[in-house]
Image (cartoon, grey):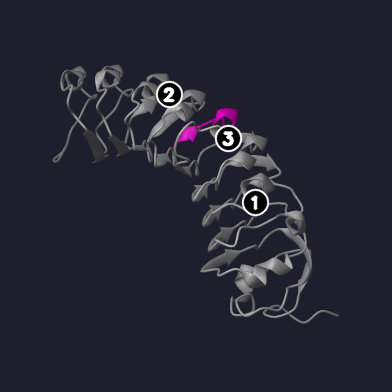
């Protein structure tokens, strides 16, 4: 919908049974909850309600829209828990719930998506608790859980046989041993800054083709492994750790 829309999403949108794309983007005067009549749009493939002032919860009825390939509810004022039923969307390629005010845990069901494993964006919320151990079964291409209040072990996201490329876990309360992780060769971007992650930087990191790496503000220790990519990064990728040393940081004593 182009132009400025104000008030709530009209119930009449439910009377468009063949609609495949519904988008309200950058509509700051759009308020109220996500319209329940959207549940009638069984042919919907793309639903984008982003950069608006929608409030209320992420509705359970979205899981009935089995043709959805793209669901974007980012940059709103949505509150409450994430419905676990969203994992029942079999064709989902991307799920964006980032930049809201969502609380509670990441649903365990998000380690059991029944069809595609979507790119998952849950950053800039107030999600807490542990990352579900069921994530060990999921091969996310791109996952962003940054700027939440997540705790514990995030190593379940990684795995030597996965094809994960982009992982952002920055600015949480995560606490695990980085050197015990098994990392896929496909990994090109890893941001874990501002956590409580300990251990050393795995030697395998020298084999990875990082376009981006930031491990700063953690509790890492030991020498940065020598390998063509790790020394070419600047010190800001590594600084503010417990006792990391070696180029590009000062040499080990």
* Relative horizontal placement of residue 15, taking residue 242 as reference (left or right): left
The numbered dot on residue 159 is 1
Name the residue tied to disc 3.
111
Q: Nearer the viewer, residue 194 or 49?
A: 49
Q: Reply above or below: 202 against 76.
A: below
Q: Nearer the viewer, residue 159 or 145?
A: 159
Q: Which residues are magenta?
A: 100-109
Residue 95 lies, in percent from the top left, at: 42, 39
x 50%, y 44%: residue: 123
x 70%, y 65%: residue: 240
User: Does 141 lie within the magenta span?
Assistant: no
Q: Nearer the viewer, residue 24 or 229?
A: 229
Q: Residues within 10 Å of mark 3 (few under 14, many from 20)?
A: many
User: Does 102 lie within the magenta span?
Assistant: yes
Distance of mark 1 from mark 2, alpha carbons? 33 Å
* Relative horizontal placement of residue 31, taking residue 174 as reference (left or right): left
In the rendered structure, which disc, 1 or 2, sits on the residue that comes first in sequence? 2
Residue 241 lies, in percent from the top left, at: 73, 64
Determine the residue located farthest toward the right in the rendered image: 253
Q: Residues within 10 Å of mark 1 (few under 14, many from 20)?
A: some
């Amino acid at each position: 919908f182009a132009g400025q829309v104000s008030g709530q999403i009209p119930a009449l949108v439910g009377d468009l049974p063949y609609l495949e794309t519904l988008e309200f983007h950058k509509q700051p005067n759009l308020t109220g909850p996500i319209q329940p009549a959207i549940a009638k749009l069984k042919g919907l493939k793309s639903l984008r309600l982003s950069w608006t002032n929608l409030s209320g919860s992420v509705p359970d009825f979205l899981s009935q829209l089995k043709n959805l390939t793209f669901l974007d509810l980012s940059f709103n004022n949505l509150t409450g828990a994430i419905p676990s039923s969203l994992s029942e969307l079999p064709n989902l390629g991307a799920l964006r719930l980032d930049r809201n005010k969502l609380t509670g845990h990441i649903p365990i069901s998000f380690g059991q998506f029944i069809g595609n494993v979507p790119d998952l964006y849950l950053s800039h919320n107030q999600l807490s608790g542990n990352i579900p151990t069921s994530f060990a079964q999921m091969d996310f291409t791109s996952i962003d859980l940054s700027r939440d209040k997540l705790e514990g072990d995030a190593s379940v996201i990684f795995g030597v046989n996965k094809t994960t490329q982009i992982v952002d876990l920055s600015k949480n309360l995560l606490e695990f041993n980085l050197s015990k992780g098994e990392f896929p060769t496909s990994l090109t971007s890893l941001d874990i800054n501002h956590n409580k992650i300990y251990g050393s930087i795995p030697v395998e990191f020298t084999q990875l083709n990082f376009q981006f790496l930031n491990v700063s503000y953690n509790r890492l220790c030991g020498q940065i492994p020598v390998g063509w990519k790790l020394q070419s990064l600047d010190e800001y990728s590594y600084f503010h750790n417990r006792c990391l040393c070696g180029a590009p940081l000062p040499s080990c004593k």
